[in-house]
Amino acid sequence: MSTIRRLAPAIVGLAAVASAALAQEPVPPHAGAGGHDHDATVHHRFDDVERWSKVFDDPARDAWQKPEDLIRFLAVKPGQAVADLGAGTGYFTTRLARAVGPSGKVFGVDIEPTLVEHIRERAAKERLPQIVAVLAAPDDPKLPEHGVDLILVCDTWHHIDDRTVYLGKLARVLRSGGRVAVVDYRPGDQPVGPPPEHKLPPERVVEEFQQGGFGLAGRSEALPYQYVLVFAPR
Ligand SMILES: C[S@@+](CC[C@H](N)C(=O)[O-])C[C@H]1O[C@@H](n2cnc3c(N)ncnc32)[C@H](O)[C@@H]1O
């Protein structure tokens, strides 16, 4: 974490210049004219692998996403089973797979069949057999019961419907001592991320997890544009 803190000011400057168009999400038709309904779920498709690979896997993202520092903060260890929920093109899935090593397992979970196929192909190409690509349903992560030590939810929580109910399903997936980490964009205008009206303030996420039977177990404000919240079942 200290690395993130030391580098944060430099990262902000670099990212502002280099990443203005990065990680933007299209405005879905139902979004209205700038309403701020933080309870609303944002629905749109991520089925275009080529388009989203350019965004999610843009090398410039590393400067502000600091994936290796985040994985260190989350204390991911060799041999663990980790789920990347809303895995997209596998930006975190592949990095988590290196962190858990060949004795571990990483579930790359998404609801877009094209992305799940892409993750499967990427895992083979990058020789990471510990990756299991999972086609989830919007209301079901389709993960093994008590099979996962950590669920990472990066830039995805606001896409999920009925989140309190969904949390019951995540609780069943966790092993004893398991955690869920939510990484998402801070409210307000920033050079990267979705439009402000799509963002969930961290207090809202904490409230939802509390309603879903989880307690806040850790947090970090070290990333320049995103908060990190870690939850454990109560
Ligand atoms: C903004 S992308 C984030 C991708 C990835 N986590 C990253 O940081 O590069 C959100 C992803 O969540 C997926 N998604 C949306 N709703 C989902 C759900 N209910 N369950 C699992 N994945 C979902 C989308 O298909 C998309 O790939």
Image: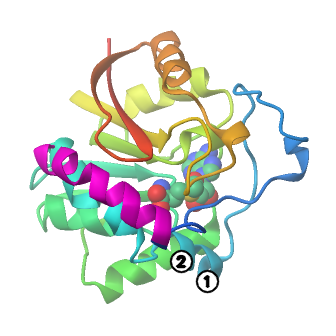
Which dot marks residue 50? 1
Residue 118: image location, x then y, percent: 51, 78
Residue 11: image location, x then y, percent: 32, 59
Mark 2: which amino acid?
Answer: Ser
Quadrant into which the C terminus falls = top left
User: What segment carries the magenta color?
Assistant: 1-17
Considering only vertical position in the picture, is 135 above or below 213? Answer: below
Ligand 1 falls in quadrant: bottom right
Lateral position of residue 29 relative to residue 90, left or right: right
Mark 1: which amino acid?
Answer: Glu
Q: Is residue 6 magenta?
A: yes
Residue 90: image location, x then y, percent: 42, 68
Q: Using the numbered discs, state the Cα–Cα distance from disc 2 to disc 1 in whole angstroms.
A: 5 Å
Quadrant of the rendered image containing residue 102: bottom left
Residue 34: image location, x then y, percent: 83, 39
Contact (Cβ within 8 Å) of mark 2 with mark 1? yes
**Between 93 and 188, the one nearer to me in the picture:** 188
Lateral position of residue 132 relative to residue 36, left or right: left
Label 1: few (<14), some or many (≥20) within 10 Å?
Answer: few
Lateral position of residue 213 relative to residue 81, left or right: right
Quadrant into which the N terminus falls = top left
At 57% from the left edge and 41% from the top edge, which residue is drawn? 140
Q: Can residue 80 be seen at all in this image of the molecule? A: yes
Considering only vertical position in the picture, is 32 above or below 80? Answer: above
Q: Which residue is mark 2?
A: 53
Q: Is residue 76 magenta?
A: no
| Disc 1 secondary structure class | helix
At 60% from the left edge and 68% from the top edge, which residue is drawn? 21
